[in-house]
Image (tube, grey):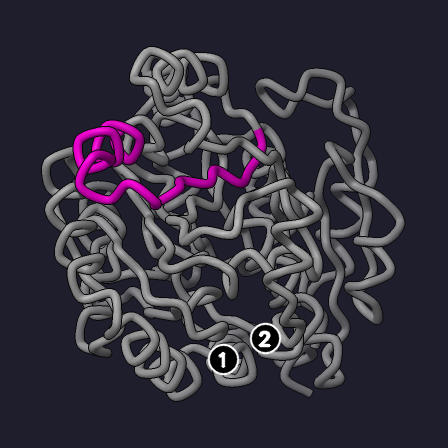
Amino acid sequence: MRVLNVNATFDAVTGGGTAERTFQLSRYLANTGIECAVLTLDVGLNEERVAAVRPARVTALRCTWPRFYVFPLPEARIGSLVGWADVIHITGHWTLLNALVYREARRQGKPYAVCPAGALPVFGRSPRLKALYNGLVGRRLVRDARAWIAIGHNELDHFREYGVDAGQVTLIPNGVDPADFGSNDPDGFRRKFELPAAPFVLFLGRLDFIKGPDLLLEAFSELADSHPGLQLVFAGPDGGMLESLRSASRAGGLSGRVHFIGPVRGTDKSHAYRAASLLAVPSRQEAMSIVAIEAGICGTPVLITDRCGFDEIADSGGAVVCPATAEGLRSGLNGMLAAATDLAAMGARLHEFTRERYLWSGMVERYRQLFERVAPARGRA
């Protein structure tokens, strides 16, 4: 069987959860003997990333306008890769690449599955452009699929709004590979990023409105006096909010306790989770937070909002779910920090919960079974 994974972004730093999901899925599928290719754009892509996903192969189109993931047309490689594939897996939603792959798949009669990964709601920037996209192609792209994949239960309502019966949707959550998070050097992490030897709350993700870093900073500022040694570390690329967050921390007299260390990758990510007292996920909108299960595999407890589609993480006893407001985050942080001696035990419980439910070795088997149902006879053979 030949599988083509399509995602406009494959960069480990700026690509976020969809890039990581595409990377892990492609690598695991290829290592099970399935022929797998990735079609993406070259934004932030480097040879290290391409080499790490092998034996899956990567085709990266040249992006000329990263803001909207635009690339030169016509692009003959789209038709060639669609023709090569038995099954196409389209991740995300609002991109020219997805639209053109959809058009080519329809033209060639190739089956495809869609995994929006939380992208279907018209939320955040460019609402008019998104409405236009849906009117021209987006709604048909979703409805015409042969299979639909949700990564969180909250996406079922999103699919309904696009005319897809929730009973037809397959739930395949995000996963994690423990081998990617085996390194443990919290002291080295602090030295490298010049952080004090003090407990800290970690935010790991893009500094973007949808991710809620401003909510977390506001919550932290409200409890800073009652936790005088506590620090806040923002680790991730700037999504447009870095300067406003810096200004707010200075205005609140917290510039010495709030740290912006930029993107972390590789072993630094593992070290960050293990050095933190807890991970905070203050997102305003998300399907299923991949950083929450990364923290879990590292044994780090999590505070997460109820807008992340991952409320079941609270069942582990290693995480707290709170409203996606500054007050909700402040209350959640206060509760977890008040029981600081229990944080290690919470982290251990979340670690076991993650290992039992969210390893990529299990997720890829669900994908393989789905693709075999969707693929034509040649692909199944």
Residue at left offset 21%, top offset 54%: 154
- Residue 71 visible in the current orientation: yes
Secondary structure under tag 2 reads: loop
How far apart, in angstroms, are the residues tagged by discs 2 and 1? Answer: 6 Å
Image quadrant occupied by the C terminus: bottom right
* Residue 178 against residue 101 in the figure, above or below: below
* Residue 301 against residue 201 in the figure, above or below: below
In the image, which residues are magenta?
A: 215-237
Residue at left offset 20%, top offset 60%: 336
Residue at left offset 26%, top offset 35%: 220
Is 317 inside the magenta-drawn segment? no
Residue 251 percent coordinates (x, y): 33, 11
Residue that mark 2 sits on: 177
Residue that mark 1 sits on: 359
Q: Residues within 10 Å of mark 1 (few under 14, many from 20)?
A: some
Residue 45 percent coordinates (x, y): 78, 40
